[in-house]
Amino acid sequence: MKKIIAAFDGLRFSESTLEEAIRLAKQHQAHLVGVFLPEFTARGFVVYEALVGQSGSGKEMFEELAKDDQATYHASVDTFESACQENGLNYSIHRDKRSALKELLHESVFADLLVIDPGETFSYLEESMPGWFVKSLLHEAHCPVWLAPVKRGMIRKLLFLYDGSPSSMQAIKMFTYLFPEMSGKEVLVLSVKSATLNLHLPDNKLIQEWMKRHYKNVDYKVVQGDESQLVALCKEEGQDILLVAGAYERSKLSTWLHPSLADELMRQLKAPLFITHM
């Protein structure tokens, strides 16, 4: 892994994204790019300006707020740059100007990994987590996405969410290729099936054959239940885990990580989540 991009809202800087991106870049001696994206609602300035017109007091207030935002933005960039310098990283700063989502998707074409806070919205409008921005990003990103929790310690165990679909296996392979140093970690391949299906691991022989050649300590678990059962099992493993899952397909929803499941994993777990798709 040679290039990691970290997405930031310059007006609401994410410390968790910074910490995780710095940690990963140091670990892999990767080039780290801080992508600072525009806050698309601009605090409602466009609406505000339309309401107040060009009146003297209204225009002056708008200009003062704009200056405050510029100062906040520059402080965020300075924080990122200082952290990179203190940690001896090779880094770049991209100040993207247009649509935050379009810019980030374009950046992801040329990245090995994208790090972002799952609560990122690029909007001052209140949204439940995950918001529209992160959902859209997971649907369209052109590289794997690492959702950074608010705070985490050392990763003790890897949870591979697997249902036999190409999307879930692709996520496991991409994670393995990007993080070969994780091969010594304890691994749980977790699969949940409805009560109408048998409890055999999908393509049991094939996946075990593949896993044995990449990981030393692997266990397999298939349980009856639904998405809520899967989330509960993940929570039982604690916070010192990392989840790996296939995500939304570009053209259609995966049979595995449905939007409702992805949303619940992000809401209820404090562990990092690695997501990619075919």
Image (cartoon, rainbow, N blue to C red):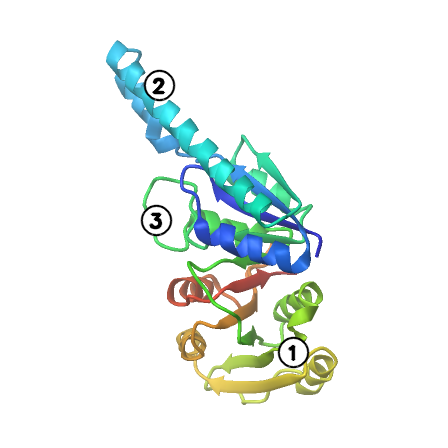
Query: Which residue type does callout 3 highlight?
Result: Glu
| Residue 255 in sight in this render | no
Residue 64 image point, x, y percent: 33, 21
Query: Residue at label 3?
Result: 127
Instruction: Determine the residue positioned at 56% across, 41% down.
Output: 35
- Is the Cβ of the residue at disc 2 closer than 8 Å to that at disc 3? no
Judge from the rendering whether residue 157 lies leftward or rightward of residue 112; answer left or right: left
Query: Which residue type does callout 2 highlight?
Result: Glu
Query: Residue at label 1?
Result: 184
Q: In this orientation, which residue lies closer to the viewer: 48 or 203?
A: 48
| Alpha carbon separation for disc pair 1 and 2 | 55 Å
Secondary element at tag 2: helix
Q: Note whether 78 is above or below 25 in the view shown.
A: above
Q: Point out the tag, 1 or 3, that comes first from the N-terminus.
A: 3
Query: Residue at label 2?
Result: 63
Query: Which residue type does callout 1 highlight?
Result: Gly
Q: Within 10 angstroms of label 3, few (less than 14), some, or many (20 or more) residues?
A: few
